[in-house]
Image (tube, rainbow, N blue to C red):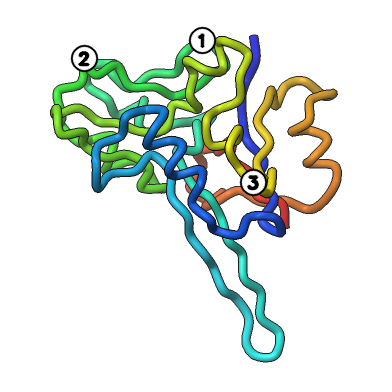
Amino acid sequence: MARYGMVIDTRKCVGCTDCVVACKTENQVPEGLNRDWITDDATGSFPTLHLEIRTERCNHCDNPPCVACCPTGASHVDPFGAIVLVTPEMCIGCKACLASCPYDARFVHPDGYADKCTFCIHRVKDGLDPACVSVCPTHCMTFGDLDDPNSEVNRQFASRPHHALMPAAGTEPRIFYLT
């Protein structure tokens, strides 16, 4: 079975938000809420500055605290691709998963359940990329099986240094950023 993840090339991302719009459209995300978003991080001081533009979302962690704290099992790891999902009908809206996520990747859907990125599992099961990946005009995102040594995501890892967000949180995220 696959263990899906994503590699994002921060040199290519221009912050256009096409991924955000594609996600909202594909997944019918309510107005004012997002499953993914764009951030920028400026480090250094003049004249040596570095700007990293990132598209962020649920990190589909290997050690997801949102799953561990869910009292009903609504937050779970799906066997297909080890993707972290929420079963809306099981969610009681307690917000424990929101509080436990160090990436602030969840929100409460107006219907009362926790919602988040699903890596567009419905598309991936049909052999397609997640909507965000499929529309990116700069092709900065690569999606694939992290356990397949010949996958494009692993070729991307070998191409340049990379990092994950908040590694000290111990969640073992599966979203990586090429620097």
- CB-based contact (under 8 Å), mark 3 and mark 2: no
Residue 150 point in image, percent of width and height:
84, 23
Distance CA(mark 1)–CA(mark 2): 18 Å
Q: Quadrant of the N terminus?
A: top right
Residue 32 point in image, percent of width and height:
24, 48
Label 3: few (<14), some (14–19) or many (≥20) C-alpha neighbours in 10 Å? some
Residue shown at 53% from the left, 56% from the top: 16
Find disc 3 in the rendering and name its residue: 137
Q: Judge whether 49 appears above or below 32 on screen.
A: below
Local SS, label 3:
loop
| Amino acid found under the numbered disc labelled 3 | Pro
Distance CA(mark 1)–CA(mark 3): 31 Å
Find disc 1 in the rendering and name its residue: 79
Residue shown at 48% from the left, 51% from the top: 17
Residue shown at 65% from the left, 50% from the top: 177
Give the side of residue 143 with respect to residue 27, left or right. Answer: right
Of labels 1 and 2, earlier in sequence is 1
- CB-based contact (under 8 Å), mark 1 and mark 3: no
Label 1: few (<14), some (14–19) or many (≥20) C-alpha neighbours in 10 Å? few
Distance CA(mark 3)–CA(mark 2): 37 Å
Local SS, label 1:
loop
Label 2: few (<14), some (14–19) or many (≥20) C-alpha neighbours in 10 Å? few
Q: Nearer the viewer, mark 3 or mark 2?
A: 3
Which one is in front, 75 or 177? 177
Find disc 2 in the rendering and name its residue: 90
Residue shown at 52% from the left, 52% from the top: 166
Query: Toward which corner of the image does residue 6 lie, by quadrant?
Result: top right
